[in-house]
Amino acid sequence: KSKITLLNTLSRVFNSQDKIEDTLETLLQVRNIILPLPEDDFLIRSYVTNSSNMASLLVQTWKIDEALRLYQRSLKKLNKYHQENQDLTLADLSAELHVNIAHIFEEMNNFSDCILHLEEAVSLEKKTLGATDFKVSATMNYLGLMYYKANKYNSALSTFLECLNIRTNSSIATKSGIVAVLYNVATVYKAIGETNQALEIYLKVLKYERRLIQKSDDNDEEEGRTSSQPKDLILTLRHIFEIYDQELGVPMEGMEYLLEAMSLCRQYAASI
């Protein structure tokens, strides 16, 4: 076990130096040490972490299929260990693997398999952390986005609303994290034709984003920096104009939002 720890440390050093081949070779050495040993929590965790690190490097080098196979083998091994030992001690690793696999399927535009893995990740996190734990909200938000991409709007809406409920009742949630989910809720309402609800929420989001940009500009001026990109604000303004123009049929009432978006595009042209 001490050799495993030492080699893992060495792999992190190689990785910090962007020596991908050396990192992979060191991780492979760790894997070859682990495989013949009797399984316990430490070795299973080490095996899964090792495989995940290798898969992450393979993704960086665009060896997506190899990375996916590594993740899937790790998940299979972990599920077998859970079944044999009748506990979910390492369920956090299972959830993490499901999310990693989901990322790969998203890259492949395979939203159905992506969603299946995210649903499993959410289920595991709820069982081990509790249904209202803040960490669950991150995976739920991701799941909601994938439902939306797959045109499963009702599922997306219910998932975003549950995510929003967790964050609004969490002591560690940030205002920006809550607003991000509100934006997603509004976008789904817009997609399903619930125009008034979408507009109401977009206007709340807009109020926050305007304050955020103003605060960022003030800080940048004081510290001599270039302001952060206001892409979110511009997108929100665009959505609001589209509702007035395309849904409500009163484009002139939304013109101020379009003009504000155009002004922001000119102001931040160098950074967006």
Image (tube, rainbow, N blue to C red):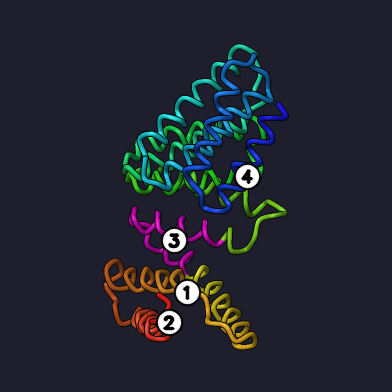
- Magenta stretch: residue 181 in it? yes
- Choose mark 3 or mark 4, whichever is in front: 4
- Does 264 sit above or below residue 129? below
Per the model, the C-alpha gap separating discs 1 and 2 is 7 Å
Residue at the image point whose x is 66% and y is 30% from the top: 4
Along the line of sight, which residue is nearer the eye, 67 or 92?
67
Q: Answer yes or no: do the residues labelled 2 and 4 have beta carbons within 8 Å?
A: no
- Choose mark 2 or mark 4, whichever is in front: 2
Q: Which mark is residue 194?
A: none
Q: What residue is disc 1 on?
A: 229
- The kind of secondary structure element at disc 4 is helix
Q: What residue is disc 4 on?
A: 135
Q: Residues within 10 Å of mark 2 (few under 14, many from 20)?
A: some
Tell which residue pokes out farthest to the top in this image. 84
Q: Answer yes or no: do the residues labelled 3 and 2 have beta carbons within 8 Å?
A: no
- The kind of secondary structure element at disc 1 is loop
Residue at the image point whose x is 59% and y is 83% from the top: 220
Quarter of the figure with the N terminus: top right
Q: Answer yes or no: do the residues labelled 3 and 4 have beta carbons within 8 Å?
A: no
Q: What residue is disc 2 on?
A: 268
Q: Residues within 10 Å of mark 4 (few under 14, many from 20)?
A: some
Q: Amino acid at mark 4?
A: Lys
1 relative position to 146: left or right? right
Q: What residue is disc 3 on?
A: 197
Query: Which of the two labelled residues, at mark 1 and mark 2, occupies the earlier sequence position?
Result: 1
Residue at the image point whose x is 52% and y is 60% from the top: 180
Per the model, the C-alpha gap separating discs 4 and 1 is 27 Å
Which residues are the magenta region? Answer: 179-202
Q: Amino acid at mark 1?
A: Gln
Query: Which of the two labelled residues, at mark 1 and mark 3, occupies the earlier sequence position?
Result: 3
Q: Amino acid at mark 3?
A: Gln
Per the model, the C-alpha gap separating discs 3 and 4 is 27 Å
